[in-house]
Image (cartoon, helix red, strand yellow):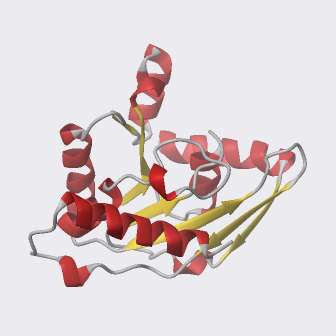
Amino acid sequence: MSLYNFCKNTAGVLIKIIYKIEAKNVEKIPKEGKIVICGNHVSLLDPVIVGIICPRKINFMAKKELFNNILLRKLFLSIGAFPVDRAKADVSAIKKSLKLLKNEEVLGIFPEGTRVKTKDSSNTKAGISMIAIKAKAPVLPVYIDTNYKLFSKVKINIGDPIFLDEYYGKKNTNEDYKTLSIDIMDKLYSLK
């Protein structure tokens, strides 16, 4: 058993003791092929929750500050997470994302870049659409609805894949990517 599956199974047992998980439309997660899983971000537990319900390994892009602790850094890197500097266009994180998708893997991103309680388009980063377009990968929106109070429900609703193929091979501007990313988040929040 891989470290990822061990962590996923262990976390799954613990999370299911503390919360009642209700996941809708899990069958929309493709069994193979590249995909960008895109979620809203309300808690540090979001990647754990999404990872538990997903039948495939997710390689999460995570804020670089989580990698400051040497033990956490080793753990996160060993389960496929990788750092991103949210203060700038992080070329190394973009390259890592594109490499994962080229290898037909699953990339997990929370495009708001920070935890938010309500939808705020100004938080949305342009990277989600730019990565999806450059990698020619569909985006799968995942809405997490919870307050994470002990023993409460955690509802996860998975939407239909979003295909951006009409933008492949075009000279898209940063403004184009930002607009497309906001559109993705609008579709994500419509799953509420």
Total numbered circles: 0
Residue 32 location (% of width, % of height): 38, 73
Residue 150 location (% of width, % of height): 88, 43
Q: Is residue 175 above or below residue 113?
A: below
Figure quadrant of the C terminus = bottom right
Query: Outermost residue, right direction?
Result: 151
Residue 74 location (% of width, % of height): 42, 24
What residue do we see at 45% from left, 63% from top? 37
Say which of 78 and 144 sits in front.
144
Residue 118 appearing in the image = yes
Q: Is residue 85 above or below residue 109?
A: above
Q: Is residue 125 above or below residue 53?
A: above
In the displayed structure, does residue 165 sit left or right of residue 66?
A: left
In the displayed structure, does residue 95 sit left or right of residue 75?
A: left
Name the quadrant containing residue 169.
bottom left
Residue 1 appearing in the image = no
What residue do we see at 37% from left, 64% from top? 181
Say which of 15 and 142 sits in front.
142
Residue 160 location (% of width, % of height): 50, 82
What residue do we see at 46% from left, 53% from top? 122
Name the quadrant containing residue 135.
bottom left
In the displayed structure, does residue 15 sit left or right of residue 152?
A: left
Say which of 78 and 133 sits in front.
133
In the displayed structure, does residue 186 sit left or right of residue 170?
A: right
Say which of 1 and 59 sits in front.
59
What residue do we see at 58% from left, 50% from top? 41
